[in-house]
């Protein structure tokens, strides 16, 4: 049994396991201690001095996030001295902070702003020298504005501790301390894979997505453009949060309604692209399994952050990557060919906008490989946060919208598509179809529980009519690294691997609504948002991609067979090794 | 002394051997960086990438350490290192004017290296020979009781 430690916090007796910090003990007793640099499971370094507490008989004030509990400890979290000290520390942070709150992308959702309000900061008594700052806007995905940076290092921890990439770090010292890539470089000239986990870790406005809102408005307002929109599976799982609706509830109907009211000409669904991906990827897997000379394990290629990671860190695995384009790229390619031809629309006048839970998708959309006839498959990618901003700009009351459907031809989807947004979901969706192709039998229980959940690496063995295949699922690049290393060393033999770049999958992607660190102490948003997608899946009568009627139609009328010539031309792509740091 | 391509290749091989030998010791980063600094005279991006690759740590960590400690340099240093003391005694005896003269003569400011790679001026506080104030050192040579007018002739010796 764990040893329990008894202490008193604000006069309340608390008993917690040994090794707990004062912050964790306080949380267990529902006592809130303010934090800023602390981010549960990502970073606890006691740097910002906001979580200060008074401990009787201890010298000075202690940072609760790193102070371990001890027997008989008497802690005070709310004294005149602490309130004053926290306020002074906030004022010191503000001294070199760019305080343009009204035009800041994080206004209203800024942890520094919230703390200043809570602690009654009324003036800027330490307004002194400002350090030299850089704004890096060269990345198609991520903007870094160091004038807002408070050196809390949460982004560095997300990039290094969680993702094990380390594209950004801490350099210099004291007043000159800088957070960012080496030698003052832009993110584009580093090992960055555009995942945006740094953005959702940032408490302030120092990191945000490269906005494409104005591009999208311009396209919508242009009478000569036919503007088509498609939201990713994970968007429906989180968009409600932006408007105060409960977390973990999919808002698919309101999402479709909101997109229609924004003025898009057609509201399609990336879910349709996900079903199409399963047809192509499933077929590719079956072919690879049948071919003795094929490269195995096959690895999914839906996650552009993961694809970048593979190209930069593990180029030897490029032949293992599925040649399939990602779902929204497939949907974009079909909008500009299949749909355009069918409706008699000039594809050159068409603008495809994707709403993604992802910042890497912005980079992906610009990849020259992902085009056809000189047109990019997808023209603009906006994040869930940007979509919410557009909805607000349009004066739409999201919460009062009716539930509507996506537009036909590319708007229907199987339950398999919904779960693309969560770790293990692409694997499960693929297995539902691959099982039926390989065995010719109906899959009765479509739920593959072994590949669900938030465990870093999940494994399963699936019996496909006598052919047993080993599969693995990894989320977050650190887990991807583990799986790849185990394959490289020969320790593991897999046939099929799913990798999603972000921990938890797209539900916690870098383009998702930002949840304050205070909330994250209590809840696991990976699990909650995943629940929304699994409920969507379960609520549908069609659960398998190959049973989606619109998918059947597109193959009958246009593509021919999965993996066929036309499908290859429009729905598949190539990859190439890339330098982490070109010199 | 700018390194030739051959010298760089040789030193790079030596660095790799040094890293190989030391990478499993506890806390290998600092001694490896010190070795590289000593050998190359500075830590280039290439050098930092080698260290990062061989130790399996991101280059941002190497760069973080390189920019934290004054002992590491990111640019090649000149053949001659000039330190003009700006400690209290030298300062009150006119050290600032001497430094200004050196900077004017060489056309660079403190912590920079001349285009031809001949001189680097290094930020310096007390050199510990206040009796000679104002004082400057060039490499191991000490020049005391300076006035700005003496600077030109001294630099000409190098």
Image: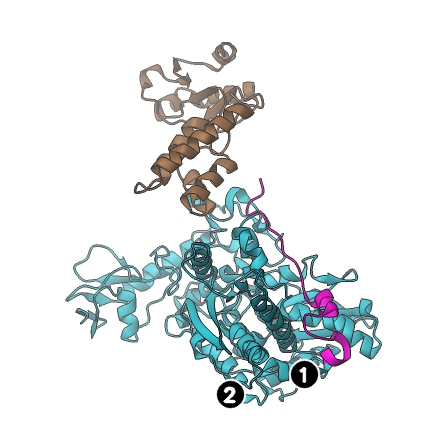
Chain colours: A cyan, B brown
Quadrant in the rendering for residue A526: bottom left
Q: Nearer the viewer, mark 1 or mark 2?
A: 2
Q: Name the residue under label 1.
A: A406
Camera-side residue: A360 or A513? A360
Number of residues whose C-alpha sits closer than 10 Å to that of mark 1, classed few (under 14), some (14–19) or many (20 or more): many
**Secondary structure beneath disc 2?**
loop
Residue shown at 38%/16% (left/top)?
A: B140
In the displayed structure, would residue B153 be above or below residue A373?
above
**Does the segment drawn in magenta span residue A576?**
yes
Q: Which mark is residue B93?
A: none
Q: What chain is tagged by disc 1?
A: A
Percent of width and height locating residue A168: 49, 51
Residue shown at 45%/42% (left/top)?
A: B63
Q: Mark 2 points at which residue?
A: A444
Is there any visible trace of residue A229 in the rendered image? Answer: yes
Number of residues whose C-alpha sits closer than 10 Å to that of mark 2, classed few (under 14), some (14–19) or many (20 or more): few
Residue shown at 48%/45% (left/top)?
A: A129
Percent of width and height locating residue A444: 51, 87
Percent of width and height locating residue A214: 70, 65
Judged from this view, the residue extending furthest toward the left is A72
Which residues are drawn in magenta?
A: A554-583
CA gap between label 1 and label 2 equals 28 Å
């Amino acid at each position: 049994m764990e040893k329990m430690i008894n202490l008193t916090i604000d006069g309340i007796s608390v008993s917690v396991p040994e090794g707990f910090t004062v912050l964790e003990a306080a949380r267990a007793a529902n006592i809130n201690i303010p934090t800023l640099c602390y981010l549960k499971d990502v970073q606890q370094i006691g740097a910002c001095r906001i979580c200060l507490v008074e401990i009787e008989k201890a010298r000075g004030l202690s940072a609760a996030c790193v102070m371990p509990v001890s027997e008989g400890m008497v802690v005070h979290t709310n004294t005149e001295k602490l309130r004053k000290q926290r306020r002074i520390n906030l004022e010191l942070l503000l001294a070199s902070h760019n305080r343009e709150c009204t035009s800041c992308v994080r206004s209203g959702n800024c942890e520094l702003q919230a703390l200043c309000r809570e602690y009654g900061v009324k003036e800027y008594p330490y307004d002194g020298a400002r350090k030299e700052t850089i704004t890096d806007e060269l990345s198609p995905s991520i903007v870094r504005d160091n004038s807002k940076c408070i050196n809390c290092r949460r982004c560095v921890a997300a990039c290094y501790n969680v993702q094990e990439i380390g594209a950004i770090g801490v350099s210099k010292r004291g007043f000159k301390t800088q957070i960012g890539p080496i030698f003052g470089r832009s993110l584009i000239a580093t090992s960055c894979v555009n995942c945006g986990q740094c953005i959702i870790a940032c408490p302030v406005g120092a990191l945000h997505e490269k906005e494409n809102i104005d591009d999208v408005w311009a396209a919508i307002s242009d009478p000569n453009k036919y503007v088509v929109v498609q939201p990713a599976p994970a968007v429906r799982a989180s968009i409600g949060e932006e408007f105060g609706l409960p977390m973990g509830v999919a808002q698919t109907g309101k999402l479709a309604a909101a997109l229609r009211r924004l003025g898009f000409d057609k509201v399609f669904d990336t879910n349709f692209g996900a079903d199409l991906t399963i047809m192509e990827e499933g077929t590719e897997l079956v072919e690879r399994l049948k071919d003795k000379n094929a490269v195995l394990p096959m690895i999914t290629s839906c996650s552009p952050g993961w694809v970048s990671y593979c190209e930069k860190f593990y180029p030897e695995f490029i032949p293992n990557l599925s040649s399939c384009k990602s779902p929204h790229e497939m949907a974009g390619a079909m909008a500009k060919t299949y749909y355009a031809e069918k409706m008699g629309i000039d594809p050159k006048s068409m603008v495809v906008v994707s709403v993604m839970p992802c910042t890497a998708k912005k980079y992906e959309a610009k990849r020259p490989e992902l085009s056809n006839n000189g047109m990019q498959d997808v023209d603009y990618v906006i994040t869930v946060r940007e979509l919410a901003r557009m909805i607000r700009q349009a004066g739409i009351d999201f919460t009062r919208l009716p539930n509507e459907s996506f537009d036909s031809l590319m708007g229907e989807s199987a339950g398999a598509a919904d779960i693309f947004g969560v770790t293990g979901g692409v694997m499960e969706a693929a297995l539902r179809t691959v099982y039926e192709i390989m065995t010719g039998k109906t899959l009765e229980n479509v739920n593959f529980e072994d590949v669900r959940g938030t465990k870093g690496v999940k494994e399963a063995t699936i019996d496909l009519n006598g052919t047993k295949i080993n599969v693995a699922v990894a989320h977050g690049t650190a887990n991807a690294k583990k799986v790849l290393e185990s394959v490289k060393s020969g320790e593991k033999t897999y046939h099929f691997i799913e990798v999603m770049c972000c921990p938890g999958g797209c539900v916690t992607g870098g383009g998702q609504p930002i949840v304050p660190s205070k909330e994250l102490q209590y809840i696991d948003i990976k699990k909650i948002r995943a629940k929304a997608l699994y409920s969507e899946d379960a609520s549908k009568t069609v659960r398998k991609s190959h049973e989606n009627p619109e998918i059947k139609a597109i193959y009958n009328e246009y593509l021919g067979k999965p993996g066929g010539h036309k499908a290859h031309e429009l729905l598949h792509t190539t990859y190439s090794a890339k330098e982490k740091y070109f010199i | 002394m700018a390194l030739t391509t051959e010298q760089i290749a040789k030193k790079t091989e030596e660095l790799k051997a040094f890293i190989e030998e030391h990478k499993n010791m506890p806390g290998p980063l600092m001694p490896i960086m010190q070795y590289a600094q000593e050998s190359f005279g500075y830590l280039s991006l290439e050098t930092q990438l080698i260290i990062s690759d061989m130790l399996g740590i991101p280059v941002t960590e190497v760069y973080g350490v390189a920019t934290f400690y004054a002992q590491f340099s990111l640019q090649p240093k000149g053949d001659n290192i000039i330190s003009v003391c700006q400690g209290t005694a030298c300062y009150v005896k006119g050290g600032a004017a001497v430094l200004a003269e050196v900077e004017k003569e060489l056309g660079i400011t403190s912590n920079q290296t001349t285009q031809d790679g001949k001189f680097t001026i290094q930020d310096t506080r007390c050199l510990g020979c206040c009796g000679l104030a104002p004082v400057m050192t060039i490499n191991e040579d000490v020049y005391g009781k300076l006035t700005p007018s003496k600077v030109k002739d001294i630099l000409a010796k190098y």
